[in-house]
Image: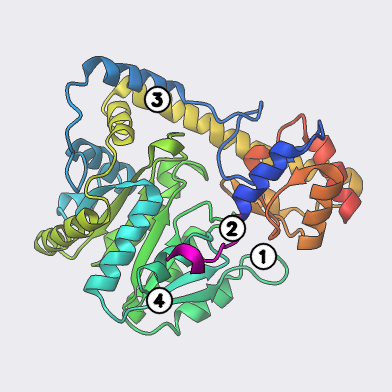
């Protein structure tokens, strides 16, 4: 029966990883894979995570299932992290947390919930968006549409975005990036979030907010501004949170689906349905990553250490953004790439064309996806002179 199954192209980013490994250029630079890297090019285990794991190893007494919603302790620390310690949403018991296998797992839970409980509703995503969004939602049977986000000059097209949102059919789902937009790095201002909220209210849209990079933009609370604005001013919001980046636990697959409803009774109704969706997808989420997060956030000492490390990572990326633009000054390209300093998060829509990206790879051993999206965490003060010289050569 397998003889008619066709081979499909591999994932573009995974292909870049393999090509980078085979490249013998001693100055090669990897700007493709979406993980944080330190100045040495490594993805380190955070000190707070190491200490939490040591405590877990010492005190763990069971490996039993943790239930379809995951560990209650995990939900108890994630909800205030995302929605705020003094959140009126939490005070009203309007929010429910379901631990998931990464942010991707949370997105699939949301997709299945929408498909099953809100039949006929389409989902709208930014153009461009994280490529996996384009697979997850259609795989759940949802119709996927796009709204503009970046214009031809590689700038945030907020006017185009807002105009498109005003035309979305009432009741449809709109996916918004909370911060550190992937792949562009262009984020909404507080004033723009307010305008989006006004349109969402007027059109009775359901926001699904992908919150994968909390703490990587401006700060833990600052990055949550749009999420909290929506949750506090709308009856219904879906939020997908990830701990992969801000805790550096990529391989532990630790995420959370947060459902916000009009009141506690409706929240409990929704929560019962999410349990079924989770059960049918993977039964129970993996426990270890959630236990790490809980251990850290329940300890004042470990939480302080974690926040310090997260601040170091965020500051390093934002400094590299500014230093990259500064290093392009001698080539007269600082204005052309000034947007890189203004963007936030690990990723940057550089404005490099596919042909320029190909030349950077073939002639200089610099690897990124052909859209021109670069992982800024792959920059270092050691490789910036080589990197900017190469970019000047292809411009």
Going from N to C along the chain, the mark reached first, 1 or 2, is 1
Going from N to C along the chain, the mark reached first, 3 or 4, is 3
Across and down, in percent, residue 231 comes to 29, 59
**Which portion, as a residue range, is magenta?**
1-11
Q: Which mark is residue 155?
A: 1
Local crowd size for mark 3, using a 10 Å CA cut-off: few (<14), some (14–19), many (≥20):
many
| C-alpha separation, residue under disc 3 versus residue under disc 1 | 37 Å
Where does label 2 land, which residue?
A: 186
Across and down, in percent, residue 255 comes to 35, 45
**Left/right of residue 91 with respect to residue 255 in the rendered view:** left
**Left/right of residue 36 with respect to residue 319 in the rendered view:** left
Q: Residue furthest top?
A: 58
Q: Indicate the quadrant containing the N terminus: top left, top right, bottom left or bottom right.
A: bottom left
| C-alpha separation, residue under disc 1 versus residue under disc 4 | 22 Å
Where does label 3 land, which residue?
A: 49
| C-alpha separation, residue under disc 1 versus residue under disc 2 | 8 Å
Going from N to C along the chain, the mark reached first, 3 or 1, is 3
Number of marks present in the image shown: 4
Local crowd size for mark 1, using a 10 Å CA cut-off: few (<14), some (14–19), many (≥20):
some
Magenta: predominant secondary structure element? loop
Q: Dot 2 lies on which element?
A: loop
The answer to the question of whether label 2 and label 3 lie on touching residues, with beta carbons closer than 8 A, is no
Mark 2 or 3, which is nearer the eye? Answer: 3
Where does label 4 land, which residue?
A: 199
Does residue 306 belong to the magenta stretch?
no
**Left/right of residue 342 with respect to residue 164 in the rendered view:** right
Q: Indicate the quadrant containing the C terminus: top left, top right, bottom left or bottom right.
A: bottom right
Nearer to me, 219 or 388: 388
| C-alpha separation, residue under disc 2 versus residue under disc 4 | 20 Å
Mark 1 or 4, which is nearer the eye? Answer: 1
């Amino acid at each position: 029966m397998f003889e008619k199954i066709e081979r499909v192209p591999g994932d573009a980013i995974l292909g870049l990883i393999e090509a980078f490994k085979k490249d013998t250029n001693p100055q090669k630079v990897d700007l493709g894979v979406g993980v944080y890297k330190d100045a040495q090019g490594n993805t380190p285990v955070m000190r707070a995570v190491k200490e939490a794991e040591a405590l877990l190893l010492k005190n763990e007494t069971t490996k039993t299932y943790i239930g379809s919603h995951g560990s209650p302790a995990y939900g108890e620390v994630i909800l205030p992290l995302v929605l705020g310690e003094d959140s009126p949403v939490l005070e009203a018991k309007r929010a429910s947390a379901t631990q998931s296998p990464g942010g991707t797992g949370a997105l699939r839970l949301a997709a299945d919930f929408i498909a099953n409980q809100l039949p006929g509703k389409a989902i709208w995503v930014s153009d461009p968006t994280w490529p996996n969004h384009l697979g997850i939602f259609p795989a759940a049977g949802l119709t996927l549409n796009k709204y503009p986000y970046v214009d031809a000059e590689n700038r945030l097209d907020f006017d185009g975005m807002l105009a498109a949102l005003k035309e979305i059919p009432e009741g449809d789902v709109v996916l918004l990036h909370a911060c550190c937009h992937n792949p562009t790095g262009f984020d909404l201002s507080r004033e723009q979030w307010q305008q989006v909220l006004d349109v969402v209210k007027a059109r009775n849209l359901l926001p699904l907010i992908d919150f994968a990079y909390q703490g990587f933009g401006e700060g833990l609370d600052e990055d949550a501004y749009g999420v909290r604005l929506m949750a506090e001013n709308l009856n219904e919001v879906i939020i997908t949170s990830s701990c992969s980046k801000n805790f550096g636990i990529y391989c532990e697959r630790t995420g959370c689906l947060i459902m916000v409803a009009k009141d506690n009774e409706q929240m409990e109704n929704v929560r019962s349905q999410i349990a079924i969706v989770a059960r049918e997808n993977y039964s129970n989420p993996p426990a270890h990553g959630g236990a790490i997060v809980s251990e850290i956030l329940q300890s004042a000492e470990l939480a302080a250490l974690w926040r310090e490390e997260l601040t170091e990572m965020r500051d390093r990326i934002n400094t590299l953004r500014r230093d990259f633009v500064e290093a392009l000054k001698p080539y007269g390209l600082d204005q052309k790439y000034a947007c890189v300093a203004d963007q936030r998060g690990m990723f940057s829509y550089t404005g490099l064309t596919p042909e320029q990206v190909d030349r950077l790879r073939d002639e200089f051993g610099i690897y990124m996806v052909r859209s021109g999206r670069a992982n800024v965490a792959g920059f270092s003060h050691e490789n910036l002179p080589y990197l900017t010289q190469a970019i000047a050569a292809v411009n």
